[in-house]
């Protein structure tokens, strides 16, 4: 009798949890490998903390090195980690590119290399990902790099794309999403 | 100072005497006016001129030097003819170059300057939106983690239950 009640309670809790997960991921592609996503999120969070500490100490080169090391790790695809895995990647790549743009004298990279980093971070399916500020930032920084190459039209296109993403996000924040 | 003087000795009865030429011409006419004494007269005039006392006082020297300085002093560039012609042309050209550069560097609508300001705006928007997005990512991951934990617990319970109820021979 006692074990039946316990099973019912666990079933109820699991059902409620599944509902919450579903609500939290409304409009987002759910991960097919949640265990891998959780592991990835933990790793990325730890590395972000490490970068925070390095930057507090003024060690920009060290921070860039940590992010570059993370860049080389195998990333979960959208089909495995869902939209969240892609957002985590865009966030980390965005931080890396921001640091490289703000500190061009640290481990200098050419603009082509920076564009390559951005393209690698965005991937081919970034437009399919649910709108988020990390993707918008990475797209915006692509525009920033294109601007330095005097590719004004391409830069303008990137900025407009990023601004459109942020406009959608701001509308969501204000609760006025159509 | 009395200035510079140059004096040559003259003989009153010689060619330096102005009366000498008159006497010479008179004598020539008296003899019928034949022949020419003009070359001799030219030499005589030169000798007279050379023998004449010339004064060269300070005032004359100053005037001379003033004339010389005026003659050899360089004319200021703004008073030269080439400047009066070329300066307006150069000014016009410079103004045209500045205008072209200014137009070239002025922000095109939605480009260059606009792009730079868009970059700043986007970064500001990111700073505004990122905290909420990170919180949402954390919530999602935590929910996934909770679900996994629940699955593991359920699995453990199921296995424990099956061992308890169905494991005994």
Image (tube, coloured by chain):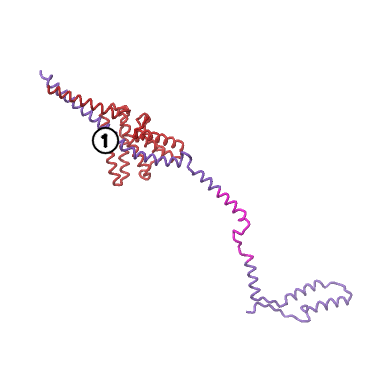
Chain colours: A red, B purple
Q: Which residue is mark 1?
A: A43
Q: Is residue A65 left or right of residue B146?
A: right
Residue drawn 31% across and 41% down?
A: A65
Badge 1 crowding class, 10 Å Cα cut-off, few under 14, some 14 to 19, many 20 or more, is: few
Observer-nearest residue: A32 or A68? A32
Magenta stretch, residue numbers: B70-95
Q: Is residue A105 left or right of residue B92?
A: left
Image quarter for residue B53? bottom right
Q: Is residue B104 left or right of residue B74?
A: left
Q: Is residue B48 left or right of residue A178?
A: right
Observer-nearest residue: B87 or B147? B147
Relative to A77, is B120 above or below? below
Magenta span dominant secondary structure: helix
Observer-nearest residue: B52 or B148? B148
Image quarter for residue B39? bottom right
Quadrant of the snapshot with the N terminus of chain A: top left
Quadrant of the snapshot with the C terminus of chain A: top left
Q: Position of residue A71 (x, y in %)?
A: 32, 36
Relative to B41, is A97 above or below? above
Residue drawn 63% across and 72% down?
A: B62
Image quarter for residue A40? top left
């Amino acid at each position: 009798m006692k074990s039946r009640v316990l099973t019912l309670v666990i079933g109820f809790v699991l059902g409620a949890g599944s509902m919450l997960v579903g609500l939290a991921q409304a409009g987002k592609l759910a991960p097919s490998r949640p265990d891998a996503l959780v592991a990835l999120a933990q790793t990325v969070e730890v590395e972000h903390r490490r970068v925070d500490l390095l930057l507090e100490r003024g060690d920009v080169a060290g921070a860039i090195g940590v992010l570059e090391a993370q860049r080389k790790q195998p990333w979960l695809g959208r089909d495995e980690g869902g939209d969240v895995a892609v957002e985590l990647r865009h966030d980390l790549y965005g931080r890396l590119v921001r640091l490289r743009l703000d500190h061009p004298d640290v481990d200098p990279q050419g603009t082509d290399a920076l564009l390559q980093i951005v393209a690698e971070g965005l991937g081919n399916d970034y437009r399919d990902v649910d709108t988020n500020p990390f993707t918008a930032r990475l797209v915006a920084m692509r525009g920033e790099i294109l601007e330095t190459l005097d590719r004004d039209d391409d830069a303008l296109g990137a900025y407009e794309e990023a601004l459109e993403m942020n406009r959608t996000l701001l509308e969501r924040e204000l609760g006025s999403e159509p | 100072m009395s200035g510079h003087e140059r004096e040559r000795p003259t003989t009153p009865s010689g060619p330096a005497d102005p009366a000498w030429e008159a006497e010479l011409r008179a004598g020539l006419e008296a003899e019928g006016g034949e022949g020419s004494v003009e070359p001799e007269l030219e030499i005589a005039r030169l000798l007279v001129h050379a023998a004449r006392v010339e004064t060269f006082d300070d005032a004359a020297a100053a005037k001379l030097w003033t004339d010389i300085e005026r003659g050899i002093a360089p004319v200021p560039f703004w008073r030269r003819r080439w400047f009066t012609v070329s300066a307006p042309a150069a000014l016009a050209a410079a103004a045209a170059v500045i205008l072209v550069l200014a137009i070239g560097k002025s922000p095109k609508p939605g480009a260059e300057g606009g792009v730079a300001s868009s970059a700043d705006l986007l970064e500001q928007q990111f700073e505004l939106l990122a905290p909420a997005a990170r919180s949402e990512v954390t919530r999602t991951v935590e929910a996934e983690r909770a679900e996994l934990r629940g699955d593991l617990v359920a699995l453990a319970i199921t296995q424990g239950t099956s061992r308890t109820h169905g494991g005994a021979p």
